[in-house]
Image (cartoon, rainbow, N blue to C red):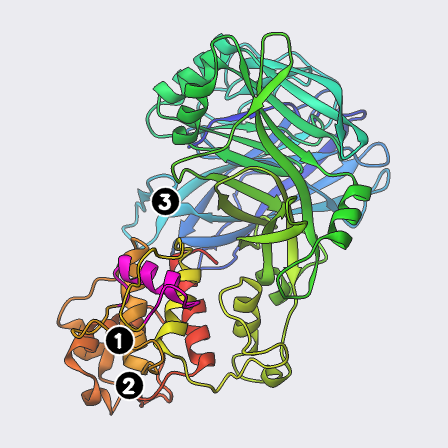
Amino acid sequence: MRHVFRRSAWAGNAALILIGALLMTAGIGGIAAAAPSSPPGPACSATASASCNALVVLQQVSGQTAVTVNFNVQPVTSPLPPVWVQIFSPSKQLIQGPVQVQPQPPSTVGSVYSVVYTVYQALGSLFAPVANVLGSVYNNIAVLYSVYLAGPPTPPPPAPPPSTGGAPPASPPGKTITVGANLPVGSLGITTAIVGGVQINASVLQLNGSQLTQAVSSLGTGTSNLQIQLTTSSVPSGNAALVNVPSDAISALTAAGKGVEVDTPSGNITLSSTVLSQISAQLPAGDQAQIEVTPLPQSQISTIISSATTSGGIYQVGGQTVQVSVNVVNSTGQTVGNFEPSGGATVNLTLPYSSGVSGTDADKLGIYYYDQSTGSWQYVGGKTDLTTGTVSVDTTHLSTYAVLLDSQTFPDIQGYWAQSDIEIMIAHHIVDGISATAFDPTGAVTRAEFALMLARALNLSMPTPSTAPFSDVPVTSPYAGAIAAAVQAGIVNGYPDGTFRPDANISRQELAVMVDRAMTAANQPTSLLPAQIPTLLAPFGDAGQLAGWAQQAVAADIEQHIIHGVTATTLDPTATTTRAEATVMLQRLLAYLGTL
């Protein structure tokens, strides 16, 4: 479980009374949840930051679930100060939060309102269930939910709460960032920064090397990253977030094999232990690495978006636009250099998307970087998380990034059965049209075309080869790099005569084999027992037409819901694959790999 640096986000101007029981209602995944039989929880203090909490036993039927937590609140002032929810295991491990929740409907003085928060968790993977004493098939899992209220600052208690109940106390709301049970690691200040000629405020977290080293040692071996969480009370809307990490602290992180994650209201950046090792090697003793996440001023965003070019597509701003960097700052506070990952190392970037983006449009969001040398936006990738409202990507360099929505479509796919999947894959730059006005969903897919689709889907490096990969694929071919990359990844093969036959059409069973190999290339191979193959193929009357070399792959793709029959009883394995079919299978492949 990750430890969390967090400044008190619930320090506010007024107090309120929290009333009522903690109600748990069943959500997704067959979870049966019963409200506790004990009386409603105690009211929180009206004069200080405090917490109300309840221990609730869930009966787990399956893993992934959505559980709704419902609190009743009665504000004593208007507007209602912030209300924050945290979730802990019974052993006081932080599972999720703090998360700010809003009352529904908006509150007024003297009335009781509901605060609803939905939690998505794979509960069984978080802590070991205890067998039900009645010996049923269910497992009992106790989860502690806590709500923190806004209020005047109060000193932290001298020790964590006892194991019999209660959540870890709120962090002191001064200028100390805390980890775990109020372990100080640094101080917070405000300065100014110039971004695109515009002066903005910047929140600066100055980490203390010795204190941070202590925090790193408290992580243990089960946590890969140290999480620094800066909430809106620490970094108000529009502020840049700057986190200064001394060289000795980076050395402590790398020695422990830990990465660092900086979470801000404008976006999150995660530097792996590999990246920190590279930073440490370039950072003189006594200097600091300054991790920057800066939201661009709206005037600059408008200028860049309107003046930049994009390669095809119809784009609009779909979320946050930020400048991210890791700068080298010397002992006098001067920026003397910046850092870029090398050797294939990546930095994870997670950005929030606009609340107005919903439905299938959310699946069309991507993260793009602004290429100043060409004045264009370049697609990097993007995995949308509907639960957190964010898009994330691993990138090999640091610069200006934006969440953009590509709404490109074509007249010949309107109302077509695969329209939605095709549009999503177009937005992720994996497939494109055959012209500016046509996609040709029923057209055949060639071996070269599908090699290119797969290389894009798996984000394979596709440099132009120095020598022809096959006798019929010259280095001047637009597919040469993709074919060479797909061959190197073990996804496609050539023929004994040294040819690739790039213009030959692909059958459905050939495509199934390539998709199965792509899973292996992405380190997520399927595994089937020999006895499973005939069972999976049994519903299809023409399964006997499958070539022997394709049976295992087709069965595996069926099991993973990547390939369906053309009907409930027909595979049609030797038929030529259409562009729509290939696109849909790739979309399902990426869903299986968890990259889309």
Task: Read off the residue under disc 1.
Answer: 554
Residue 377 placed where, x, y %?
64, 52
Does label 2 or label 1 sit earlier along the sequence?
1
Numbered badge on residue 125? 3
Q: Residue furthest left?
A: 530
Three-letter amino acid code at the position of disc 2: Pro
Q: Amino acid at mark 1?
A: Val
User: Residue at 62% across / 61% down in the picture?
Assistant: 311
Q: Position of residue 127 (x, y in %)?
A: 36, 39
Give the CA separation, mark 2 to mark 1.
Answer: 9 Å
Q: Is residue 490 covered in magenta?
A: yes
Mark before the other along the chain sequence, 2 or 3: 3
Q: How many C-alpha atoms fall within 10 Å of the one at disc 1: few (<14), some, or many (≥20)?
A: many
Q: Tell whether 139 sits left or right of 190.
A: left
What amino acid type is highlighted by mark number 3?
Answer: Ser
Give the mark count. Answer: 3
Give 484 or 528, whichever is nearer the viewer. Answer: 484
Q: Is residue 383 visible?
A: yes
Give above or below for 536 relative to 520.
below
Look at the numbered discs 2 and 1 and tell me whether their residues touch, using CB distance below 8 Å: yes
Q: Is residue 335 above or below residue 128?
A: above
Determine which quarter of the picture holds residue 172.
top right
Q: Secondary structure under badge 3?
A: helix
Region of the chain picked out in magenta, as a range: 473-492
159 with respect to 531 (left or right): right
Q: On the image, numbered disc 2 is attached to which residue?
A: 573
Residue 60 in the image: x percent, y percent? 39, 52
Viewer-closest of 117 and 478? 478
Measure the C-alpha gap from mark 2 to mark 3: 39 Å
